[in-house]
Image (cartoon, coloured by chain):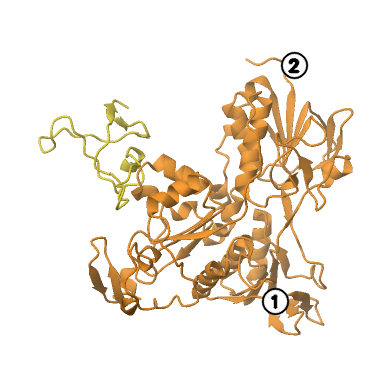
Chain colours: A orange, B yellow
C-alpha cells in the first residue's frame, strides 16, 4: 500500500494542536505519502485540555479524550506515549528520547506546547501548591483536596477561572487572586470583566483583584501550605494554592539545538510555520510568530493546518491571529435580568420614559444600538468579533444553517455561554455559566411579540 | 432516510408519508439536536427585522 522509503514526519508533543495536525495530515493523504511518527510525554493520547474542570464534574479521562479508539493505528500513525524527547540532532536528523531511542526524521514538527508559569515567590513549591495543566495534575489536586477546606487560585484568566471551578467542584471554599484590576484582563474590558465577576461570585467563588501574591505561607511545623501573603501586606488563608498565572513555551528543545528563538521565548516561525531550520516546523504554544506566542488553541489549530498544507505542497499561510478581543453580548430570547438588544432599541425612547436598567449598574452600557443577532454571527465569520457572550439561548440548535453557525462560534477567541441547562451551545463555550431561568425569579420580561410577561418565582 | 439541502444533511431521519402535508413538501420539527432541521435552513434574514427565513428551503430526500 505504501512505499517503504516514505519520508518520516516526526511530531514531538501530543496535545490538542498535535492531534489537529495529524487530522489535517490524514485529510490531505500525508499518512500515505509519509510515515507519521508521534512522541508524547504524557501517558495519554490527546485530550480536551480546554474542558479539564469537567473531570471534577464526573467526566472521565476517557470522555475527555479527543482521539477516537484506533484512529491513529487505522491511519498507520505510530504513537509513543510516556516518552520525552531529550535532544534534536539536526545533522544526523535524529531525536533522542528518554527511553534511550534515536528516532529518525526527514521533517520535524515541534508541538511541545507550554507549561504553567509559576511565579518566583517564596514557598511556590511547598506541599499544597499545584499547577493546572494535565490530567495527572488534576488527579494530584483531587487527592490533596480531600484534606482541605479552602483553595486559592493565583491568576484570573480563562484557565484560572476554570481551575477555580475545579476547586469549587471539589467542595473547597474558593478564591481567585488576580494581579490586574479585573478578571481576564487580556480579553475583557472593564464592563465585561465586571459582569463576569458578578457571575463568578454567584457561584460562591470570591474574587480578589489588584492583588500581587508575595509568598505562599506555610505552617512552621510541617511546611505545608496555609495561605498566601500579598505585596500590600494582607493575607488569605488557603490549604491549597493553584498557580494559573499564564504559560511559558516548552521551548528547551529548539533552544538547545540552536534554532532562532523569540525575544520572550518560543521558537521563531515564518508564515509557513517553518523555524530557522527548513526541515523543522513548530505549531501551537511553542511557536513564536511575528513576535507573538499564542496561548490559545485556535491559532494553534490554524498553524497545524498550515504545516499539513505546506507538507502536502498546497500551502495555506499563517499570517497571525488577532488577539484583541471585544465583548459583544447577545440575548435573543428574553432574559429577565439582562437583555442588551432591548436595552438599546433601534429608536431610543424619550429620555423621561427611560429607566436605568436594574441590577447591571456596574456595566457600562453601550450608547448605540449594536448588531442584530444574524449580523453578530456574520461579524464573527468576517473576523470583526472575537468574543461573544450568549445568555439563555441555544443558537447551535435554533439558528439557521447550523454548519455555518458552528464554524463561526469555533472561530471565537472567547465564547461565554450562560444557560439554565447544558445545551449544544454551552458545549462549545470556553466558559459556561449558570443563569436563573424564568421559573426561578420574580419580574417581567418582553417576549418575542414585544408583550410584557409577568413571571413569579416557582422554584429555588 | 437522508434529507439534504445545499447547506447540510440530516442522516437517518424517519419519514412518514401523510395527507396532512401538501404534496411536494417536507415538514421537519426543529427542536432536536440529533436531527437538527437547522442543518438545512437558509441563513437569509428579513432586511428590517433581521428575522431568519426559517420556513422555506429546497431539500432532497434519499434513502440513507
* Mark 2, other Cα within 10 Å: few <14 / some 14–19 / many ≥20: few
Q: Residue A243 in the image: x percent, y percent?
A: 71, 66
Q: Nearer the viewer, residue A126 or A236?
A: A236
Residue placed under numbered mark 1 in the picture: A211
Answer left or right for A91 relative to A251: right
Residue placed under numbered mark 2 in the picture: A5
Mark closer to the observer (1, 2): 1
Element type where label 1 sits in the image = loop
Q: Residue A39 in the image: x percent, y percent?
A: 73, 38
Answer left or right for A258 relative to A197: right
Residue at the (49%, 73%) spot, across then down: A363
Q: Nearer the viewer, residue B6 or A242?
A: B6
Q: Residue furthest bottom?
A: A233
The quarter of the picture where the N terminus of chain A appears is: top right
**Displayed quadrant of residue A299:** top right
Looking at the image, is A5 positioned above or below residue A16?
Answer: above
Pointer 1 indicates a residue of which chain?
A
Amino acid at each position: 500500500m505504501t512505499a517503504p522509503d516514505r519520508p518520516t514526519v516526526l511530531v514531538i508533543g501530543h496535545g490538542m494542536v498535535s492531534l489537529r495536525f495529524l487530522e489535517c495530515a490524514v485529510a490531505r493523504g500525508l499518512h500515505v505519502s509519509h510515515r507519521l511518527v508521534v512522541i508524547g510525554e504524557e501517558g495519554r493520547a490527546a485530550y480536551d485540555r480546554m474542558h479539564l474542570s469537567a473531570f471534577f464534574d464526573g467526566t472521565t479521562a476517557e470522555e475527555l479524550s479527543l482521539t477516537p479508539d484506533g484512529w491513529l493505528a487505522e491511519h498507520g500513525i505510530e504513537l509513543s506515549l510516556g516518552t520525552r524527547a531529550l535532544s534534536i540532532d539536526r545533522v544526523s536528523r535524529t531525536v533522542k528520547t528518554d527511553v534511550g531511542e534515536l528516532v529518525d526524521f526527514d521533517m520535524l514538527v515541534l508541538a511541545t506546547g507550554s507549561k504553567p508559569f509559576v511565579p518566583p515567590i517564596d514557598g511556590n513549591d511547598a506541599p499544597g501548591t499545584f499547577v493546572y495543566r494535565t490530567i495527572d495534575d488534576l488527579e494530584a489536586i483531587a487527592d490533596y483536596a480531600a484534606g482541605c477546606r479552602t483553595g486559592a487560585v493565583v491568576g484570573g484568566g480563562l484557565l484560572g477561572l476554570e481551575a477555580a471551578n475545579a476547586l469549587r467542584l471539589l467542595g473547597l471554599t474558593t478564591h481567585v487572586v488576580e494581579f490586574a484590576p479585573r478578571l481576564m484582563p487580556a480579553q475583557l474590558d472593564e464592563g465585561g470583566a465586571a459582569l463576569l465577576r458578578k457571575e463568578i461570585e454567584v457561584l460562591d467563588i470570591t474574587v480578589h483583584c489588584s492583588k500581587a501574591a508575595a509568598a505562599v505561607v506555610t505552617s512552621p511545623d510541617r511546611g505545608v501550605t496555609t495561605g498566601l501573603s500579598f505585596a500590600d501586606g494582607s493575607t488569605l488563608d488557603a490549604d491549597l494554592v493553584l498557580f494559573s498565572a499564564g504559560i511559558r513555551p516548552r521551548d528547551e528543545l529548539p533552544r538547545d539545538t540552536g534554532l532562532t528563538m523569540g525575544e520572550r521565548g518560543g521558537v521563531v516561525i515564518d508564515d509557513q510555520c517553518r523555524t530557522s531550520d527548513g526541515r523543522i516546523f513548530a505549531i501551537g504554544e511553542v511557536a513564536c510568530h511575528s513576535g507573538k506566542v499564542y496561548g490559545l488553541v485556535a491559532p494553534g489549530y490554524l498553524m497545524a493546518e498550515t504545516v499539513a498544507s505546506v507538507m502536502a505542497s498546497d500551502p495555506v499561510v499563517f499570517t497571525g491571529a488577532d488577539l484583541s478581543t471585544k465583548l459583544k453580548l447577545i440575548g435573543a430570547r428574553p432574559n429577565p435580568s439582562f437583555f442588551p438588544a432591548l436595552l438599546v432599541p433601534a429608536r431610543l425612547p424619550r429620555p423621561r420614559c427611560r429607566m436605568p436598567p436594574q441590577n447591571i449598574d456596574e456595566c457600562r452600557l453601550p450608547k448605540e444600538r449594536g448588531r442584530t443577532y444574524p449580523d453578530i454571527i456574520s461579524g464573527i465569520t468576517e473576523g470583526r468579533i472575537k468574543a461573544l457572550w450568549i445568555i439563555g439561548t441555544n443558537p447551535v440548535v435554533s439558528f439557521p444553517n447550523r454548519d455555518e453557525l458552528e464554524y463561526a462560534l469555533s472561530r471565537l477567541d472567547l465564547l461565554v455561554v450562560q444557560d439554565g441547562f447544558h445545551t449544544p451551545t454551552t458545549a462549545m463555550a470556553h466558559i459556561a455559566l449558570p443563569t436563573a431561568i424564568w421559573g426561578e425569579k420574580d419580574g417581567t420580561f418582553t417576549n418575542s411579540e414585544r408583550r410584557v410577561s409577568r413571571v413569579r418565582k416557582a422554584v429555588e | 432516510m437522508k434529507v439534504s439541502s445545499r447547506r447540510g444533511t440530516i442522516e437517518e431521519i424517519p419519514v412518514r408519508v401523510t395527507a396532512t402535508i401538501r404534496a411536494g413538501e417536507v415538514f421537519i420539527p426543529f427542536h432536536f439536536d440529533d436531527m437538527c432541521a437547522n442543518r438545512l435552513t437558509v441563513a437569509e434574514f428579513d432586511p428590517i427585522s433581521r428575522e431568519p427565513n426559517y420556513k422555506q428551503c429546497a431539500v432532497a430526500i434519499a434513502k440513507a
